[in-house]
Image: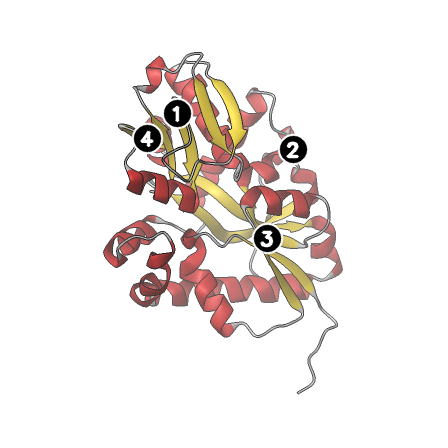
Amino acid sequence: MVVDLLHPARIGMVNFINTAPFYEVWQQTVKRPEWQITEAPPTTLNRMLYGGELDLGFVSSHEYGIHPHLYKILGGLSISATGSVGSVFLFASDDPVHLDGAEVLLSSQSQTSVALVKIILEEFVGVAPCYQAGAIPQDDDTPLPQAIMAIGDDALRLKQRGIYPVCLDLSEVWYEKTGLPFVFAVWAVREEFCQHDPITVVEIHHELQRCIKEGRQQLPAICQVVAPRIPMSVQDCHDYLSKIEYDLGDKKIQGLELFFDYLIRRGEGDAAALPLDICDED
C-alpha cells in the first residue's frame, strides 16, 4: 500500500490517563503514519508548540492565553470539568487560609494549573505563599513542603498515599466561586498550519471527535487497561474518568474567557486572547 505523506502533521499528545478515553481509541484506530505523535507533559508540549516543533496539540489553556496570536483553538474540544475534576489538587497540611508566606510546591507539568492555584490562593483565599516549582516527591523519604499542587497521574498517586489532611480539588473550588466549568487544556493549532494545510486540520479534528465519541462508549474496557498505571481500582478509574469532559460548549468558553480575564488583570495574559479565536470543525 502506498502511503500519502504529502500532508504530514506534528501532533502533541498528553499521555496522562485523563486522555485515555480518546487516546486509547486513537492509538488503536488512527492509521496515519504521516501524523507524527509526540507524547509529553503539558508544559513540554506548550514549549514545543510555541517553538514551532509541533503543528497542533493538546496544550495548557494558559499557553493560548499568553500567546493567542500564534494559535487557533479547535472548536468543541477540551479537557475540562464542571465541578470536581479529581486530578488537579492542592494538598496541604493545614487550611489554605494559613498558607500566607508558606512554601507551596508547584508541579512543573502544567502552566494552567499553576496559574489556577495562584488565582485561588491569592484572589479567592487572600494569601500570598512562597511558590517553588519542581517535581512531585514520589517516595515517603523526601521532606514535604507545607503544600503541594499536583496534577494528572502524580496527583492521583499522591491522593492514594493520603499524606496530607487537606486535599482541595481546584476545579471544584473554581466552580464554587465562579459558577463556571474550568478548562484545563485546549487543542491549539499554529496559525500558519491552519493556513497552509486546512484540509489536514479538518481531518485531524474529525478523528479527534470520533475518538472521543467511541472512547466514551468503550470507557469500562479502557479503564481495565489504564487503571494499573496509577495503580487504582478499575471502579475508581471509571469514577474519575467519568468526571472528565472533552467538549468546549458555551459555558466552557465563558469559563475559559473568565480565566483569561484573570490572567490579563494579573499581568500574566495577553489581551488578544479575548475573544477566543476558534476554528470550527468544518
Mark 3: few/some/many CA within 10 Å (<14, 14-19, 20+): many
- Which quarter shows the C terminus? bottom right
Residue 240 against residue 220 in the figure, above or below:
above
Q: Marks 4 and 2, Cα distance to the nearest angstrom?
A: 32 Å
Q: Nearer the N terminus, badge 3 or badge 1?
A: 3
Discs 3/4, front: 4
**Residue, disc 2:** 272
Q: Is residue 277 visible?
A: no
Helix, strand or loop at disc 1?
A: strand
Between 280 and 28, the residue placed more toward the observer is: 28
**Amino acid on which disc 2 is placed:** Ala
Mark 3, mark 1: which one is toward the viewer? 1
Which residue is under mark 3?
57
Q: Name the residue rendered at 59%, 35% in the picture.
A: 65
Identify residue type, mark 4.
Leu
Q: Which residue is identified by label 1? A: 147
Earlier along the polypeptide chain: callout 1 or callout 2?
1
Which residue is depicted at the point 37% across and 60% down? 226
Whole-angstrom CA distance, mark 1 to mark 4, is 11 Å
Callout in the foreground (3, 2): 3
Residue occupied by mark 4: 168
